[in-house]
Image (cartoon, rainbow, N blue to C red):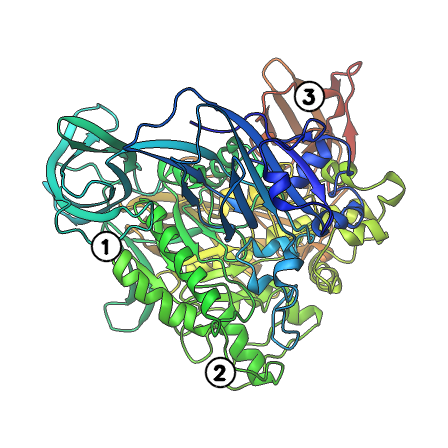
Amino acid sequence: MIIKDHWKLRDFREGEAKDLEVASPLYDDYFWMSAEVPGDVHTTLMRHGLIDDPFYGHNDQKCRWVEERIWWYRTVFTLDEAPRPDDKMLLVFEGLDTFATVYLNGAELGSTDNMFISHTFEVSRELKPGKNVIAVKFDPVHAKVGGKAVSTFWSGFSKERVWTRKNQSHFGWDWGPPLLCAGIWKEVRLEKYDAARIEHVYARTAEVGEMEALVDISVELTSWDRRKTYSVLVELLDGESGEVAAVETLEISGTAGSGLSGLAFGMSLTGGTKLRVSKPKLWWTHDLGTPHLYELRISVHADGITLDKRSQKLGIRTLELKQRDADGKPAFTFMLNGVPVFAKGANWIPIDSFIGAVPDVRYSRLIDMAKAANMNMLRVWGGGIYERDIFYDECDRLGILVWQDFMFACALYPDYNRNFMDNVAKEVQQVVKRLRSRTCLALWCGNNENDWLYEALHASGDIPHPFYGEKINHELMPALLEQLDPSRTFWPSSPYGGNDHNSREEGDTHNWQVWHGNIEPRVFGEPQLQDYSVEGLSFKKFKEDRTKFASEFGMHASANLYTLQRNVPQTELVLGSAEMMNRNKDINHLKGVMLMEGYTGIPGNLEEYIDFSMLTQAEGLKYGIEHYRRNKPETSGALFWQFNDCWPGTSWSVIDYYGLPKAAYHYARKFYHPLLLTAEYTPGDAELVLWGVNDARETVSKTAELVVYGMDGRQVYARTFAAEIEACGKQRIAVVKLDDLLQGLDAAEAVCVVRWMDGCGEDNFYYFCDHKDMNFRPVNLNVQVNPEEGSVTVSSDYAARMVRLEMDEAWLDWEDNYFDLLPGQTRVIHVGQKEGKEIPWNTLRVSALNGASVALNRRQPVTE
């Protein structure tokens, strides 16, 4: 039974009410406000008009009182009949955020202090036929941990958060506001069992051969009758045909037992078997093949009765992290079914400040957008949450690997405190058991940046004390993972490896030379220095990076204008206003200005800021990622920071809070294409090098074309080149001198396009000067709209830079956007709306960096 109806919510000040009185079934909650579960306090208050939207303006400051109060949830549910004497009734809370005390019919069942794990209570005696009352009290964070905060211990953004097993970014980060949520953020269920319950299933591919695969299955039961012998039926069905691919039966005896389960004093019993699967269909990332999924069914029986059953998706695949190449040199390459994977993707943060209220469909939309951008890996960053099941469901289904951090980030953690460590151990055990059978799960990572930042800041003299938290990811986690999931690599931290945990010589790295101006390389013991200058922050620094795996790097860009208009008062919608500054939670705003200064020039108004920041981000990521891909196999992955936003702010994201892509998202679809044609060129170079990069499992033979145009479309250079690129390889196709390309044309007035002649992929545009030094001609855009077909047709009289299409709606699905256009070239761009809403064609605006915006309205369906 899912308990989701009739929930109510109310706040109390400390000392205002006695707990047992509020928890009593007789307590009168008639005038409490209705609440949705799953959900949270803030969204409930917004729905009732009791707080203004915290994302609008500075409203987050107006609702700080919410986190100071005690909050109670109550509901009533009906039980048709009393449990039988042998029934075990379990009340399950999948997620409570965070310091909660749970009551049923006035009886205190227990307290919780960890948002990341589920909490189960055996309630057979406390239930009664008819109406039953659940009450849940949430204490404010400061009341539980405020006295423990040690001000001298290093912790970015908050001193309280390190004691709180809660979404760390709820305390604020450099891309989101501090909003300390509370509430029942996941599902609540009442479950009934007789004699036994399936606790966990661990399924992993042991071996894969051409004709047969071996799949190991482990089953953990909780038994309340140890006299029985349990028969467990294990079936693997082909997800496409429904045919049984393999079947085994194992017996698990309760006579020996394996210890108390901790759940109503049942016994924890385990057993295992091996499934032999003939002619297995393997699971691949979507760029390497088909992410085929089987259906695994587990059922437990005793005395001819089915006691419990479970079903889950399972892909057959081998996956390992190769840390040495054939010559024994350091590497960091994921091998999927024996094939080297170049990891292409981004870092994933919580998709909302108020996670409990987010519908599953928003996850589906975003992960589908990741696949559409040719991403094959997402990193679940360690300052957020272990994601909801829908996230891993979609990654399994769509063929996207997951780099999974544990939730520790940018801080020292109190590993000297036994209570805290017990809580962490319970968290790690439960999270690993929940996720370890996920086909998409590629890596466990202990934390985000703790090891690197501690060593660097300790060397700089900023942290004088020991590395608190080291025992978590260097002792506790590896010991538990060796026992619970030996099938995957555990990586202690990100970044990690080498002489400096951010060394380019081995392991993974976070390139914050770009944006933060870090001066690298450095070695252990040296202070971490920064170069805050136009040259020091420039994205051209990427070209110096020979990392094995770039797991974080990026730069800011503005949210789309529609997103800003919804959240910034009109009078403040100007560059440099207090409200616009509030959108950017990264303290040193000059970094973004200097990045633009070096490439686009400094913006003079809001429109230029949106345009220049988006172009700089897009071209900067393109510059870095194409470099990393050309550097394969020495470099084996590029996961930029960051994919999504939790609120409508200015950040490193490529998709803003309302699901509207920035320019960099559309660039990503091109620079992450499995068959990339790329030009290696930096303004000032005397030659251009043409490369082909092939991430597929087959050798490809292609013809590449390189064409140089003037601003008026006049062709000054054109040549084709034969290319044969080996599987998962690259080819240096051609080297062409700049003078030959330009044929006397001014470099500031030239447009270079490279493309595959068979139409594979999309045209790749390059310029021989930074944008600020280009001489683009003013363009006139011709725009035609066909609402029936959902399309916009755009052409231009001269070369158009970054053509942007926008309308006043969220979740618009543009086929392409922020694209360059050659003179005489016509692009037909289709658009949809992911929520099924009507497209507001009357708000369409089409512009280019070198062309004024063309606005349409209902009376003028076609504009030239």
Q: Residue at x 75, y 64 (%)?
A: 590
Label placed on residue 784: 3
Would you call the spot at circle 2 few (<14 residues within 10 Å), some (14-19), or many (20 or more)? Answer: some
How far, Cα to Cα, is label 3 from label 1?
72 Å
Label placed on residue 523: 2
- Name the amino acid type tagged 1: Gly
524 or 698, which lies in front? 524
- Name the amino acid type tagged 3: Gln
The picture places residue 277, in percent across and down from the top left corner, at: 13, 38
The picture places residue 700, in percent across and down from the top left corner, at: 30, 44
Would you call the spot at circle 3 few (<14 residues within 10 Å), some (14-19), or many (20 or more)? Answer: some
542 or 843, which lies in front? 843
Q: Residue furthest right?
A: 571
Label placed on residue 259: 1
Q: Earlier in the sequence, mark 3 or mark 1?
A: 1
Q: Earlier in the sequence, mark 2 or mark 3?
A: 2
Does residue 714 lie above or below 323 as drawn?
Answer: above
Q: Quadrant of the C terminus?
A: top right
Does residue 464 lie above or below 395 as drawn?
Answer: below
Instruction: Name the side, left or right, on which 149 lies relative to 481.
Output: right
Element at label 3: strand
